[in-house]
Amino acid sequence: MENAQSSPVVLFDGVCHLCSASVQWVLQRDKVGLFRFASLQSEVGKRMAERLGLQQPWGDSVILVVGEQAYVRSDAALEIVSRLGTPWSFLALFRWIPRSLRDALYCWIARNRYRWFGRFDTCWLPDPKWKARFIDLNG
């Protein structure tokens, strides 16, 4: 795995079923262990978002932090798949769709995600084999 300080970090809504399922999807396809993760509800997640100057509510977006760069909403999703390698990186071709259209769809899904997919009462915890990839569980 990459140095923890240089690894891209995915910040996600830890109580959202869809968001947690998306994190599991990335974990299963990230064969080289590139990404690290933290829930937006955790102190680590909150501090990272605040340090980058991101406005609340953060829970309506997945956030990808790469160094001092933050990608949000559809840009984050497309940047994540672009780093997963073939065949997933081909999904990044959707960048040709204007961000305003991509984000409109993203925000519509985000607004309805709890109703459609449900939510946990507390933050989802990963399978123990992936625990080391979660910075909010390891300090």
Image: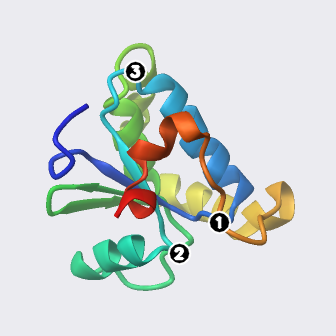
Secondary structure, mark 1, is: loop
At mark 3, the secondary structure is loop
- For the C terminus, which image quadrant? bottom left
Residue drawn at the location 44% of the way across and 35% of the way down? 94
- Residue at the far top in the pictured view: 86
Name which residue type carries label 3.
Lys
Circles 1 and 2 in contact, beta carbons < 8 Å: yes
User: Which amino acid lies under the numbered mark 1 shown in the image of this protein?
Assistant: Cys
Residue 96, given in percent of the width and then of the height, sits at: 36, 38
Give the residue pinned by disc 3.
Answer: 31
Up-down relation of residue 103 to residue 54 (above or below): above
Q: Is 129 located above or below residue 58 in the figure?
A: above
Relative to residue 66, is residue 12 drawn left or right? right
Task: Depth check: give the residue in front, 101 or 62.
Answer: 62
Q: Please state which of residues 102 and 73 is positioned toward the viewer in this rendering.
A: 73
**Helix, strand or loop under label 2:** loop
Q: Which residue is mark 2?
A: 41
Q: Which residue in the protein does label 1 denote?
A: 123
> Does residue 98 show up?
no
Residue for point 60% across, 63% down: 14
- Disc 3 to disc 2, how far (Cα)? 26 Å
Query: Which callout, 1 or 3, points at the residue further toward the start of the chain?
Result: 3
| Crowd rating for badge 2 (residues with CA inside 10 Å; few <14, some 14–19, many 20+) | some
Q: Residue at x 23, y 45 (%)?
A: 7
Where the N terminus falls, by quadrant?
top left
